Amino acid sequence: MTTSTLPGTDPAPPLLRVRDLAMTFPGRRRSSPVRAVDGVGFDLAAGETLGLVGESGCGKSTTGRMIVRLLEPTAGTVEYDGRSIAHLSQRAMKPLRRDIQMVFQDPHSSLNPRQSVARIIADPLLVQGAGAEEARKRAVELMELVGLIPEHADRRPHEFSGGQAQRIGIARALATGPRLVVADEPVSALDVSVQAQIVNLMERLQDELGLAYLFIAHDLSVVKRVCDRVAVMYLGRIVEIGAKDRVYDAPAHPYTRALLSAVPLPDPAAERARERITLLGDPPSPAAPPPGCTFHPRCPKAQAVCRTEAPALRSLAPGEPREVACHFPEQD
Amino acid sequence: MADTAPLLTVRDLSVTFPTPRGPVRAVDSLSFDVPHGRTLGIVGESGSGKSVTSLAVMGLHTGADVTGSVALDGRELVGLPDQELNRLRGRRMAMIFQDPLSSLHPYYTVGEQIAEHHRVHFGTRRAAARARAIEALAEVGIPEPRRRVGEYPHQFSGGMRQRVMIAMALVCEPDLLIADEPTTALDVTVQAQILDLLARLQQERRLSVVMITHDLGVVARVAHEVLVMYGGRAAEQAPVDALFAAPAHPYTRGLLDSLPRLDDPDDVPLRAIPGSPPSLLDPAPGCAFAPRCARAAAGSAEERARCTAERPALGGPEGHTAACHFAAFPAFPAYEGVAP
């Protein structure tokens, strides 16, 4: 997988370029509007995996939905393969949907219970104008590709376990031969013993098909496993982004550090030995974000400037591709 | 009875639900102890029977047939009339659930709901019960308890609601707390707060805790002893260090091997367990894990036949048991050191 994705060193334009992306949902009645995503930017190279992590309400799913254009951003740009897609009409978007596909969290609720598996997987092909026979043939091939038994093509979703249903969702996403797959919590609804199967499947498919993944998840261990680079979101913004090893081994944002130290390790001896940073309070509501750095009310390092001035996302040192939005980042 | 006797003793507990497709045995011959001041972690996947076990202990299984014995401080709970169970529930044993919002009544203030427990069990007068509710909120780390005691559940965040549930569960100072996936719906930074809180309360009150979870990280962090369940049965029981360092059942080993870990140095491919957890509707005659088991698959034809035909019994060295015909108990030096 690619590691040469440093800005300025990669001559080819990235597959996906996102800049200043924002989504403001109007408030209901007298409540104020919600800035779910507030100025998010990143690049994703062909064949690369970028992890988007954060807690509930941080805007990671909304970001994913804007990129596949299930939502139209209120501001900012999304360029796919050099072409701006943020405000394309659904009609103009349709041919691009071959290239950009999505995998959802809950496999069963994202599959039509009344359709056969073959029909579900063939659906994107039929939408794109393929003939019924050809689409079905391709669907059966895809079942084999994702580890389903082709003889089960006429079964309905309820006859499959959660892990198998997620394979169906993945097969459907791959039907049109996409280059970019946005996967929103693709394993978090699955049993622990099944998660690894889906993670391994997604990695194999990436190697075989050269897919780029935007992998949205709250589970930091899973993200570490699958990603080349990671972006950590807090309250609608990216607070830290960089190569996986840098972010996990030397987290520079106090939130990233706290997040990593909060993940319980499946190792009792390590759990007893480790030092834990426990954050106070809950993540604030995006309807009423705190002034300055939105993390300051929970931050163990907050100073006066943090309460008034929002820190920009910036590189810690010249040539360092990892960027942090903090007035007092950890230096290693 | 001496204080060293376990608070909770469960023996041969089975829970069977009648269904249109025949009886489903959700829990099958389960036995475990929870000593005073200790935490038992019950780990399992969906359908493993871990939640049904906790409901059966509390006597909350509706419409199920329960056999075996559940003894709290020597008192048998199975077959006890509801009236008597009501006197114990909330008083001697309490439970918290995954989703606090659906366990709290939306029409009553959290103060009223906490105070009600105290009034029911101790006949406390309204004002005194309210004062006790304020204390309870303070104990679980809710800021400004005097003000918040008059607020409704929807005015609390997810983490604060779980604190309210804990306050409600502990207001009558029970000896046993059953926590069924108490942090699964919470963000990881809030989960850390709740686990810290439970650990502090346990230490202050010598509380016995049954922590039911699918998360092996949570178990590693909070449990003293662990019970791994699969298909309604105990797959393995061991002190926490032994379980993680020297798992004897192929299922436990498989689970640990399949986990992506933050502290893994390398990106070795995950060793996934093939297949899915079993359905309880038509249980296999042999070992429930046999169809997915690496040990069975690697065995001789004769061994495989035994796995598919014959239910393995729990067995093993003192304090560490596994239900596997071919359980391997790696040498683990600390078996003696970790017992209570």
Image: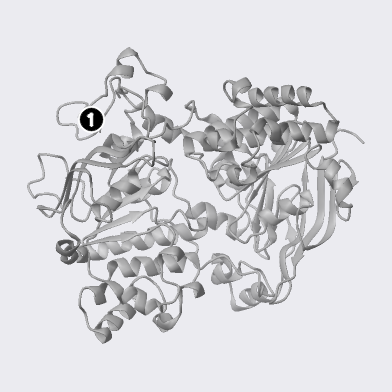
Residue located 18% across and 55% down the image: A46
Q: Quadrant of residue B160?
A: top right
Is B213 displayed left or right of B339 in the figure? left
Which colour style is shown? one colour
Residue located 82% across and 54% down the image: B11
Q: Quadrant of residue A151?
A: bottom left
Q: Position of residue A16 (x, y in %)?
A: 17, 51
Is B104 displayed left or right of B126 in the figure? left
Would residue B332 be seen by someone viewing this image from the given angle?
no
The C terminus of chain B, quarter of image: top right
> At label 1, which amino acid type do we have?
Leu
Is B103 displayed left or right of A159 in the figure? right
Q: Position of residue B9 (x, y in %)?
A: 82, 47
Subunit that carries the residue with mark 1: A
Q: Can you name the residue that lies furthest to the top here?
A: A304
Q: How many marks?
A: 1
Which residue is labeled 1 in the image? A313
Q: Position of residue B323 (x, y in %)?
A: 69, 61
The N terminus of chain B, quarter of image: top right
Q: Quadrant of residue A80?
A: bottom left
Is B198 displayed left or right of A286 in the figure? right
Relative vertical location of residue B331 with respect to residue A164 in this rendering, above or below: above
Q: Position of residue A304 (x, y in %)?
A: 33, 13
Q: Can you name the residue that lies furthest to the front here?
A: A29
Residue situated in front as seen by the camera: B257 or B337: B257
Residue situated in front as seen by the camera: B282 or A37: A37
